[in-house]
Structures are given as structure tokens and as C-alpha cells.
Image: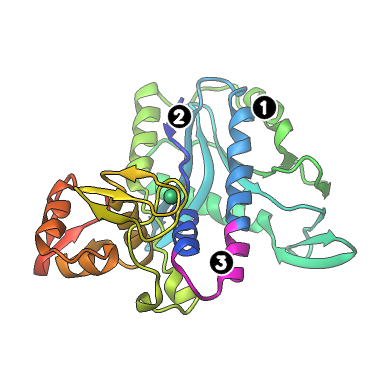
Amino acid sequence: MIVKERRKPDQMLALEALQRRANLRRDEIEKDLLLARAGFRGEEALNYHLQQIPPHSHILHDIRFAVDELFVQLDTLLLADNFITIIEVKNFTGTLTFDEERHQMIRTLDGKEEAFLDPLLQVRRQKNYLRKWLNAHQYTELPIETLIVISKPSTIIHTSNPSVIHSAYLPFKINELESKYAQRVLGQNELLRMGEELKQAHVPRKIDLLQKYKIKKEELRVGVHCSSCSTLPMLRGYGKWKCTYCGYVSADAHIESLRDYRLLVEESITNRELRWFLQIDSERIARSIIQSLNPVGKTKGRRYRLDFL
Ligand SMILES: [Zn+2]
């Protein structure tokens, strides 16, 4: 049962928005977007293997919550009445060597060696945080297992640690753990509550790509972009937006552009900022666009919420 679905991460959506709207650092943005997309594809590929695990598991994807004011992010979490599994997905290519003495992971690709933060340490930290969170919320103590899942079948893994596996092995690994933890510890109600409470505890990561790439908001390309071909700006006439490049016509293309604003600039907007970003002259049209957003939430100083887009 899926409690929390995997959606396109905001960071990837923001990179897509920036690719449309940045005049500067385009190569860097393009490269980071390709990496983000590959990572997301790797996580999505896991879904197929997760279909084969016992149905009593409650699955939460991409979950980030605070423990003692520090955040922990988990790619996938499996909750069951006998044990919990933390899954960390890694999308590396080449050959991976896990050096457990020095706590590093070495990747060899095209004859070049590179060291990365040890995923085994990462999942250990995740496990500690999750344990703390569960204790703080007074859940019955359950065993927590951690797995590092390598998503690319062509990646060669060097380690004797049984918790590092290729994704195709995941269902078999879960079956092994099922036999190890044959005893059911948690009641169904407590299990359901745990999944719901973790889902509610999720706090999306705040991203500030403009700061990361040192781009000022005034340097962004503004206007409504075409949902079909991404060209901007679309022109407005008779209450509709029209793409001058591909001819696509839409009454609500501005919504996607306001999402770009949320992802890149701020989670709320004023009438004036909206007119600038969407390149609308009329205050009245800007107001009607704001009113058509659902729900219209006003914050202080006549700012309108965009966080639901
Ligand atoms: Zn177009």
C-alpha cells in the first residue's frame, strides 16, 4: 500500500523552470538538470521492484522530517508490522567500492577514481534519526533495517556488506528479512497511524536556485511560457494565451508560470509582481488571475499564496 507517492521533486521542477528562464549559466543548469532527472528515473525504476514485495508493507516515498530541529530525508521507507526498512537509492555508474574501514565509497569510471560520502554512514544516520522520531512519538519499538539500492544494473559493486544490493534483488532481500522478523509486533491501527503521522511530518526542502547559481531575479526571462513548447512569452488576447512559435492556445497557461515564480522566486506574490512576471499591463486582469487561483490565500501586505501550485 502506498501511503505517500513519489512525485517529481521540487528541485527538478525548479531546474526545469530555470532552464526556461535563465539567460546565464545555462550549461551548468542543463548539466544539473540531467543529473536530477537521472536520479529521479533511478528512484522511479524502483517502483517496479516494489510491486513484488509483500502487500502488508506501507510505502512512503521521498519523506523529509525534523528530529531535534535537524532534518532527515529518506528516499523510500517501508513500514510493516514486523520491521521497518529504510531504502537509499543510488544512481551511480561505473564501479563502486565500499571502504568500510575508512567510511568512504570510491567510484571508478573511465579509469578515474573519485571518493564520495559513504552511503552506509548516511543510512546509519537516517536510522538513528528515525529511531529517535519513533521514540519521541511513542511508537512500539520495531527493528529497523537499512538498504542501499544501486539502481543501474550495469554498475559493478565491490562490498561484502549484504545491505548494498542491486534493485532487482530488492524483493528477494525483503523476503529474507520477512523470514528473519517473523514475529508481528505492531497492531494494524498503530501501523496505519505511524504511516499517516510520518506523512504529515513531511516538510518539503526549501530550494533557492537563484542564490545557488548567483542569478538575480531581475535577470530571469519573464512572461508566460508555452505549456507545449516552453517558448516565452505567450501573447494574451480575448482572455487566452497564444504561443507565437507553435500556435498553442490556452486559457490558464499562466498557472505554470506562477509555479515557476514559486519555485524560483517566492511562495507568495503581489499584484505588481504578478504583472511583472507574467508581463500583464492591466491591474484588473492580474486581479482576476489572482482570484481564479484556488484557494486564494492572502498573507500580510497583500501578498497572495502560491505554495499550493
Ligand atoms: Zn509553443
Disc 1 marks a residue whose amino acid type is: Pro
Front one among 279 and 42: 279
Q: Residue at x 25, y 54 (%)?
A: 236
- Kindly identify the residue that appears in the image at 73 percent across and 31 percent down: 169
Of callouts 3 and 1, which one flags the residue occurring earlier in the amino acid sequence?
A: 3
Q: What stretch of residues is rendered in magenta?
A: 21-33
Q: Position of residue 50 (x, y in %)?
A: 59, 29
User: To which residue does mark 2 refer?
Assistant: 2
Q: Tell me where residue 16 appears, x and y as whole percent.
A: 49, 57
Asked which secondary structure carries label 1, the reply is helix
Q: Main secondary structure of the magenta part?
A: helix
Q: Alpha carbon of mark 3 to alpha carbon of mark 1: how far?
A: 36 Å
* Residue located beneath label 3 in the image: 29
Q: Amino acid at mark 3?
A: Ile
Q: Secondary structure at mark 3?
A: helix
Q: Nearer the viewer, residue 273 or 246?
A: 246
State the mark number for residue 171. Answer: 1
Q: Rate crowding at label 1 as few (under 14), some (14 to 19) or many (20 or more) other CA atoms within 10 Å.
A: some
Colouring scheme applied when the structure was drawn:
rainbow
Q: Residue 56 at x, y = what percent?
A: 50, 21
Disc 2 within 8 angstroms of ligand 1 (CB): no
Residue 73 showing in the rendered view = yes
Mark with earlier residue (1, 2): 2
Does residue 209 lie above or below 1 as drawn?
below
Q: Name which residue type carries label 2.
A: Ile
**For discs 3 and 2, the disc positioned in front in the rendered view:** 3
Residue 28 highlighted magenta (yes or no): yes
